[in-house]
């Protein structure tokens, strides 16, 4: 059973690869290509589904139409120990919105300031970064 899955995964990867000699698509100057949450210093550990709230206790990921197959294959977010903005991660692209949560509440809820939550909502409304699961969490 594993071999067909691997073949399908490899076939999918081949289909997603750019054509030889093709130029990578560059984002528009005002496009936000992903979300980076810098949780260093907050003692936040990787989990299957991160929870992100604003400082008024509104769940910022509630109602986001995540693709269940993509969640199973890639996870809602990518977790990394280090991040270099000069060397963009493929998950978040070259122009991510980088936010630092204020704190953790309830053991697993990342809390953003009202201003940062507004930036995230605007970016998702325009560029669908949450819908496309373009999320990276530094822990």
Image (tube, helix red, strand yellow):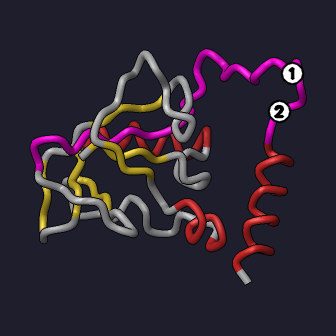
Image position, residue 118 (x, y; %):
37, 42
Which mark is drawn over residue 99?
none
Viewer-proximal residue, 38 or 99? 38
Q: Residue at x 75, y 61 (%)?
A: 9
Viewer-proximal residue, 4 or 133? 4
Asked if residue 3 lies left or right of residue 70, the reply is right
Image position, residue 105 (x, y; %):
12, 64
Image quadrant assignment for residue 98: top left
Residue highlighted by disc 1 = 22
Q: Residue at x 34, y 63 (%)?
A: 50
Image position, residue 55 (x, y; %):
19, 53
Let me know if residue 34 is in the magenta part. yes
Q: Magenta part of the protein: which range?
A: 17-42
Can residue 70 be spotted in the picture?
A: yes
Can residue 115 be spotted in the picture?
A: no
The residue lying furthest to the bottom in this view is 1
Which mark is drawn over residue 18?
2
Q: Residue at x 57, y 71 (%)?
A: 72
The residue lying furthest to the front in this view is 3
State whether residue 100 is above or below residue 139.
above
Image position, residue 120 (x, y; %):
42, 42
């Amino acid at each position: 059973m594993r071999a067909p899955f691997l073949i399908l995964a490899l076939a999918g990867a081949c289909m997603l690869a750019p054509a030889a000699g093709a130029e990578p698509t560059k984002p528009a100057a005002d496009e936000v290509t992903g979300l980076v949450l810098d949780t260093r210093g907050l003692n936040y550990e990787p989990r299957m589904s991160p929870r992100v709230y604003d400082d008024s206790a509104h769940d910022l990921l509630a109602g986001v139409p995540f693709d269940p197959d993509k969640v199973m294959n890639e996870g809602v977010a990518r977790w990394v120990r280090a991040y270099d903005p000069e060397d963009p991660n493929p998950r978040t692209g070259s122009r991510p919105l980088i936010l630092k949560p204020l704190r953790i509440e309830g053991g697993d809820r990342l809390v953003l300031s009202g201003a940062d939550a507004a930036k995230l909502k605007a970016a998702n409304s325009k560029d669908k970064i949450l819908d496309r699961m373009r999320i990276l969490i530094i822990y």
